Image: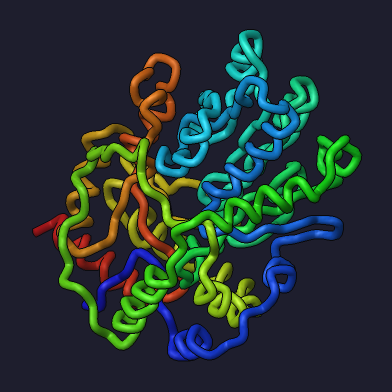
Amino acid sequence: MPTITHAPLLTRSIMLAALTKTVHPDSELSIPWCRSGDRAFWFSRSAWSLMAIAQWRQHLRAGETPIVIWLPDFFCNSSLTPLRRMAMKLRFYPVTVLLEPDMDACRAMSIESCPDLFILVHFFGQKAPTHDATKFCAETGAWLVEDAAHVLSPLQGIGEHGDFILYSPHKHLPLPDGAVLVVRLNGPANLASQPFSMKTLDDICQNIIAAPGFSKMRSILWLVKRIIQGIGIRARWKPVAKFLTEDDTTNLELEHPKMSSHAKRILSGLLGTLDDVADMRRRNRQLWIQALVTANPNRQVMRSVPGEATPYLAGFAFADETQAEKTYLQWQQVGLPVTTWPDLPPEVSGNTAMHRTAVKLRKTRIYLPVHQTIAPQQIKEFAARISREAYA
């Protein structure tokens, strides 16, 4: 049975583009992610986009106390490395079971201190409500950052309300790296009227990208690996991490902030395919649900996680940790690249009283890839194999 990879594969045409296509200017690459009046900056990962925003806000403090950044407690700790190295004050607000901000808890937290940046995440392609978050930011003076890394490109209700929008095309497309920071000058904070210029942000972004240590070797190795996978040579399947293994990612070394030229060449050839990619990802998510939930005789213990926009992954929620782990191990045994998410920050995992919902979500949900190079027949074959294993 063909292996399903975690990330989309390179087609021959994309491989050729990666080697030969002229790199589009950043302004042209940004077109699908920008609306009228927006500015955009490209990095390798959205973690660096967050760093740029934080530095810009910090610039207003003229060296005074570090700014306060609020993030949902259901968040990847590895993405916070640049902010931690800047000694930013990170606070984690609780989310509801629907992965929406618990605004009552946020207002209670604001009594002690207000945020300078409020990060609102559109988890797994599911639109997060923005009205209350926008109102809260207006009350506290915070800049609103929409984290749309789990969404391929702007949609109705996503990318329309924040002062900044974070997109991570590398999570959805066959790219070694690539994340775009969109600045909405006409957003709720009305950044265009603030007593500082875009020149400051331009300088900040350029300084981040110009950091020493950039090498093309990482993207070259990525490209070689994907070319090998694309011609049908795959590594032998091996089990992934144990169900609740938590690696220490607090000081994880992230790749260099600069987006590679290989990624820009590949993206240049993919800009016209984004709608098709979105359709295929939605289709594959629905096929997984039909095969593993609807047709599952034990479906009362498993349900699908919302993600109707352009899903990053297909999520499955379970009644308890025991059922989630049992299914996780079963799917591993048939060769599926099943994962858990996220690597919770230690401030969250170490305070279960305040972050009860996030910890429970981490322990009761598992995920499968939905990328555009998964064939519907592969999903059907794996689902049939899972069913056979269940009754073996």
Residue 61 pos. (x, y %) = 72, 26
Q: From what the image shows, is residue 322 above or below residue 270?
A: above
Q: Nearer the viewer, residue 261 or 281?
A: 261
Q: Nearer the viewer, residue 220 or 6?
A: 220
Residue 129 pos. (x, y %) = 67, 37
Q: Is residue 385 left or right of residue 65?
A: left
Q: Nearer the viewer, residue 389 or 84?
A: 84
Whether residue 282 is visible here, answered yes or no, is: no
Q: Nearer the viewer, residue 153 or 183?
A: 183
Residue depicted at 43% across the width and 26% down the height: 357
Residue depicted at 58% across the width and 33% down the height: 100
Residue 199 pos. (x, y %) = 79, 50
Quarter of the image for residue 252 reads top left
Q: Is residue 239 left or right of residue 220?
A: left
Residue depicted at 65% across the width and 56% down the height: 206
Quarter of the image for residue 388 reads bottom left
Residue depicted at 55% across the width and 49% down the height: 48
Quarter the C terminus occupies: bottom left
- In the rendered image, the residue lying farthest to the right is 193
Residue 259 pos. (x, y %) = 54, 64
Quarter the N terminus occupies: bottom left
